Image: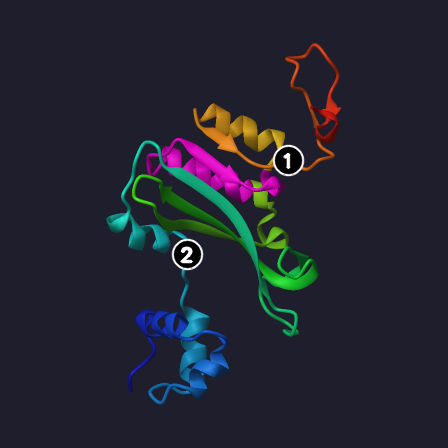
Amino acid sequence: MTKPTRLDYCQYLLTTRVNYTLTHYADHCERFSHDQINRYLAGDRLPPRLVWESVQPHLVQTPDGYIIFDDTILDKRHAQDIAFAQKQYSGNAHTTINGIGVVTCVYVNPELDQYWIIDFRIYDKQGDGKSKLDHVQDMLDVLVNSRHVAFSTVLMDSWYASKVLMLFIESLGKKFYCPLKRNRLVDDSNGTKPYQHIDSLE
């Protein structure tokens, strides 16, 4: 009796457009039963390093590369009990929903106008105690000190615009760009004036 493999499951994920559930897979696959797929999913693990191992041979690096950090919420509003799902704000839904948070890391080669996802982390603060900012810092540390990825600039949205993360990026010798919310306090006077709201600057 054949058993589902990682390749089988990944092919399913690539071909389905709406429904990614185990039940949907079993309903549309004559080769494997619901129980076989359930056993496979319960036993297999897809850690973030597998993404890097798959992408690395195809990654075209440049010293002027960009690293983009962003997060998304996998909507699980209709799931009663699912691992990693928790109440969190979704920018797409513009409200708090029950979902799985994923922080993604994308490499961009601006010379070729090409990009690759090279890392990710599941946001599970109750499980590992890490915030999304912690995950970004961890991924940056791995990129620079373990994988020695060539890049010059980090791009991120306002959620990650924290002093600690900015100083960490600076300590790595990299530049960063991120929007700041209008109510953030900043100093553009090199310490000669008190901090001011961004929307009060000219």
Q: Is residue 188 above or below residue 100?
A: above
Q: Disc 2 designates what residue?
A: 47
Extreme residue toward the top, this view:
192
Quarter in which the N terminus is drawn: bottom left
Disc 2 element: loop
Instruction: Point out which mark residue 180 bears.
Output: 1
Looking at the picture, which amino acid does disc 1 mark?
Leu
User: For residue 85, what is the image quadrant?
Assistant: bottom right
Whole-angstrom CA distance, mark 1 to mark 2, is 32 Å
Q: Residue at x 55, y 51 (%)?
A: 71
Looking at the picture, which amino acid does disc 2 mark?
Pro
Neighbor class of circle 2 (other Cα within 10 Å; few <14, some 14-19, many 20+) is few
Looking at the picture, how far across and down is residue 130, in whole percent? 59, 45
Queried whether the magenta region covers residue 108, the answer comes back as no
Q: Residue at x 45, y 78 (%)?
A: 38
Left or right: 104 in relation to 190: left
Magenta region, residue range: 134-160
Q: Does label 1 or label 2 sit earlier along the sequence?
A: 2
Q: Which residue is drawn at 46% across and 51% down?
A: 120
Q: Residue at x 73, y 31 (%)?
A: 199
Frontmost residue, 127 versus 54: 54
Queried whether the magenta region covers residue 152, the answer comes back as yes
Neighbor class of circle 1 (other Cα within 10 Å; few <14, some 14-19, many 20+) is some
Extreme residue toward the bottom, this view:
30
